[in-house]
Amino acid sequence: MGYNIPVEATLDVIGGKWKVVIMCHLIKGEKRTSELKKLMPGITQKMLTQQLRELEADGVVNRTVFDQVPPKVIYSLTEYGWSLRPILDAMCNWGEGHIQLKSKEMAN
């Protein structure tokens, strides 16, 4: 796939409303699908599944299936996914500052 500038490649992998949120939760530890769903009440099950599949296809998220009844599936970041940590941390830090700025503006 051709990109005009490198940030397009980054956005191709982590773009969209939910992928970064999913990865931020996985930085804190591996999660089951149901745990992610509880942490992200605004996402539909269909969208969560789709986003996880795309992240897995891009090599960012690992899906581990345990052979038991009922089946247990755990998601975690791959080593490649962990390489996105500085970007995710920067986005979280910027967001915290943005929230503070907006709350100050609303208070005035």
Image: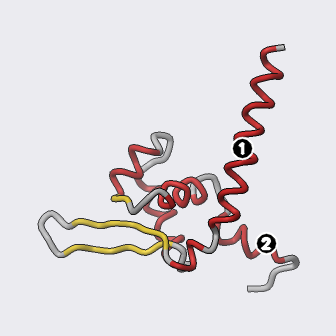
- Mark positioned earlier in the residue sequence (1 or 2): 2
Q: Is residue 77 above or below residue 37?
A: below
Label 1: few (<14), some (14–19) or many (≥20) C-alpha neighbours in 10 Å: few
Describe residue 61's horizontal placement relative to residue 100 as left or right: left
Amino acid type, callout 2: Glu
**What colour scheme has been applied to the protein in the rendered image?**
secondary structure
Residue identifier under label 2: 8
Image position, residue 99 (x, y; %): 72, 34
Residue linked to disc 1: 95
Foreground disc of the pair 1, 2: 1
Q: Amino acid at mark 1?
A: Gly
Which image quadrant is residue 107 in?
A: top right
User: Which quadrant of the rendered structure holds the C terminus?
Assistant: top right
* Residue drawn at point x = 23 percent, y = 65 percent: 72
Mark 2, residues whose alpha carbon is within 10 Å: few (<14), some, or many (≥20)?
Answer: few
Q: Residue furthest left?
A: 69
Residue drawn at x 33%, y 66% as measured from the top left: 74
Task: Report how many numbered discs are placed on residues in the image.
Answer: 2
